[in-house]
Every structure is written in C-alpha cells, then in structure tokens.
Image (tube, rainbow, N blue to C red):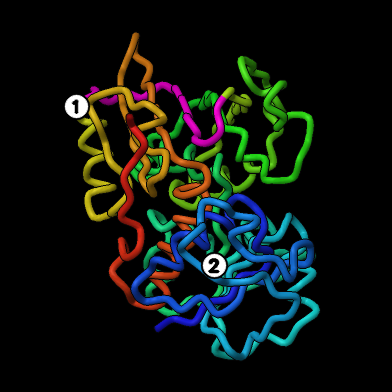
C-alpha cells in the first residue's frame, strides 16, 4: 500500500483529493494536516464524506511515515514549508500550488517536473520524485493546443476565452464567491494577464521550439460551481479531418482526454477526471472547445493520476467516476 499524507487539507481540491484517496485500492491515507481546522473531524469540514472516513485533521505530521506527500496549500506556502523541513530521501511530493510550475531559476531552484501527464508522462514513470500539478485554467488550454504544438502548427496568434466555476477560486470566502454575487452573473477578470499564462506559454514552447505567437487569454467568472470551458481559435492551414486525426493520434494512448464530434457540455465532465475536446473549422479558423472539472482534472484527479504514474500503477486506478450529466 502507498502511504499518503496531505498538507493543507481544508480546501475544495483537498476535499476531492481525500474523497479519491480513501477509496483508492492501493492507498492508505495516514494523516491530513491543517493549521486552521486541526482537531476537527474531516467530515465536519468535507461533509460529502459522511460515512466514509473517521479521520481527524492533525496538527502534526510525520514525513518519515509516508511514501508521498500532497501539498494543497496556497501559493507560496509549499515553498515555505519545504524550506522548513528535512525531506526524507524516499519521499515523493506532489504540489497543487503554483510554486514550482515554472522551470527552475536562480531565484526559485527546484527539481519539480511539470505534472501535465499528456506531456510529461515519461519523466514521471522513469523516476521523478517531485511533481508540480498544473493550474486548472492552464490544464484546459494546454490540452486544447498541445497536439497543434507537437505538429508545429501554432504559428498565429491564439485567442482563448476561459470560463471558470466558483470553486476555481478556492474555499476561502471572498466577494466573488458569494452566491448573491455569483448567481446569474458573469465578469471578465485579469484579461491578458492571468498568472497561469506563463505556464501555458512554457508548455507550448516545450512542444514547439519555434513558438513565438501571442496568447490572448480572456478569463471569465461563470455562474456555476465547478467546471472550466476553454474556447480557443486560431488560423490553421489544415483541413478539419486532418486536424481531428492529429488530435486523435496525440491522445490515443492517454486515458482521460477524448475528442468528440459533439460540442461538449460542462456536465459531461463534472465529477470526472476527463477532458473532452471538440474541433471545428469556420471561415478558415480552427475552433477548439475543451471542458474539464477544475477540482478533478484541473487539480485533485490529475494529482492522483500523477501518483499512479510515480508508483507504477495503472493510470486510471481510483479515477473511474461518472459525470453528473443529468
């Protein structure tokens, strides 16, 4: 059994991570640390787990007693935590913050592999110890575009509108997550300046070294709880059947990303670790629509997928879930 610990267990992504791990056939969840709710029962914070676990949030942690650590703390806090502890030689770490998503620099040296399985599966299978989970918006956009990057087809500006659910902002209460504000409402935020643009550009450049086009990303807060829809368009010289084949070939040996002939609904993927992509060509422009669940494929689900790869398990273990399509 893989012995698991979680640092920062009270947020939405952590709640989904706990839900997956307590039902994972190859995992023993040893402890869940939280500095804010230590001593409370997990089910008192994550009420959807009533009847499934008797675990209590811990104020202490033992890194020697686990095989893998999931870090679910806010941005900047994972780096602080890891700098303050001695990391055992055997311990693997999967970070769900954005602290290590970008390539190492003098100011931020690290050994983390970027955890986009559809791009970096081989490093994870071949001995990586530390993995940085992608951002949820980045995940949707990257999966929309990496087959084009692999085939050197990102040669014009890319326009992307990304609509996100309220849970993308985390469990911390703030004005933009209040029901009275979010319901029946939409608003653009951080246009052309979203923090996750940097990791998207890094990923596309890794696939296509000649990539120098601009990414025009327009994030939008949507009036729903969970899910992300990324709608991208760009010029592409190939005919639609050729493009569809490129995508099918790229994702053929990946377990969670699918090409569909129907424009997908968010509900096709909510509560699953899937990404569903639809392709169309209109007036010479390629239109790519991708949907994911921000808390699963965009966070906890992908993190468990990463764990499966690090420990040599079948990729879909513990991740077979049905969408809430009705």
Report which residue position mark 1 lands on: 241
Closer to the camera, 134 or 181? 181
Queried whether the magenta region covers residue 233, the answer comes back as yes
Give residue 126's quadrant in the image. bottom left
**In the picture provided, is 53 more to the left or to the right than 36?**
left
Residue drawn at x 28%, y 47% as measured from the top left = 250
* Residue 242 rendering spot, x and y as whole percentages: 21, 30
Report which residue position mark 2 lands on: 131
Label 2 neighbourhood size at 10 Å, few (<14), some (14-19), many (20+)?
many
Secondary structure at numbered mark 2: strand
Which part of the image, by quadrant, shows the N terminus?
bottom left
Give residue 112's quadrant in the image. bottom right
Residue drawn at x 56%, y 33% as measured from the top left = 225
Queried whether the magenta region covers residue 61, the answer comes back as no
**In the picture provided, is 268 more to the left or to the right than 108?**
left
* Residue 61 rendering spot, x and y as whole percentages: 69, 81
Label 1 neighbourhood size at 10 Å, few (<14), some (14-19), many (20+)?
few
Q: Give the range drawn in magenta.
A: 224-240
Q: How many marks?
A: 2
Can residue 150 be spotted in the picture? yes
Closer to the camera, 156 or 140? 140
- Mark whose residue sits in front, 2 or 1: 2
* Residue 14 rendering spot, x and y as whole percentages: 59, 58
Position above or below: 82 against 277: below
Residue drawn at x 76%, y 83% as measured from the top left = 85
């Amino acid at each position: 059994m893989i012995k698991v610990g979680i640092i920062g267990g009270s947020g939405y992504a952590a709640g989904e991570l706990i839900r997956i791990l307590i039902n994972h056939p190859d995992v023993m969840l040893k402890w869940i640390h939280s500095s804010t709710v230590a001593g409370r029962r997990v089910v008192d914070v994550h009420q959807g787990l009533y009847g499934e676990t008797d675990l209590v949030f811990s104020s202490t942690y033992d890194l020697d007693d686990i095989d893998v650590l999931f870090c679910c703390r806010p941005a900047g806090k994972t780096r602080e935590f890891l700098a303050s502890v001695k990391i055992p030689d055997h311990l693997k770490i999967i970070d769900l913050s954005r602290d290590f998503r970008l390539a190492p620099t003098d100011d931020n040296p690290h050994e983390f592999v970027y955890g986009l399985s559809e791009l970096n599966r081989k490093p994870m299978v071949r001995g990586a110890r530390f993995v940085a989970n992608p951002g949820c918006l980045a995940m949707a956009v990257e999966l929309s575009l990496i087959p084009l990057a692999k085939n050197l087809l990102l040669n014009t500006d890319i326009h992307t509108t990304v609509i996100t659910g309220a849970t993308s902002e985390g469990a911390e209460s703030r004005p933009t997550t209040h029901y009275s504000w979010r319901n029946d409402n939409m608003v653009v935020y951080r246009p052309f300046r979203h923090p996750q643009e940097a990791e998207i550009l890094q990923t596309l450049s890794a696939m296509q070294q000649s990539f120098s086009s601009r990414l025009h990303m327009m994030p939008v807060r949507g009036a729903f709880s969970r899910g992300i829809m990324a709608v991208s368009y760009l010029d592409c010289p190939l005919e639609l059947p050729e493009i569809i084949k490129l995508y099918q070939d790229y994702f053929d040996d990946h377990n969670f990303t699918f090409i569909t002939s129907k424009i997908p609904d968010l509900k096709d993927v909510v509560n699953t670790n899937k990404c569903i992509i639809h392709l169309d060509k209109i007036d010479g422009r390629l239109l790519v629509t991708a949907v994911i669940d921000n808390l699963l494929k965009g966070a906890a689900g992908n993190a468990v997928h990463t764990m499966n790869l690090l420990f040599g398990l079948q990729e879909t273990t513990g991740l077979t879930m049905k969408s809430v399509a009705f």
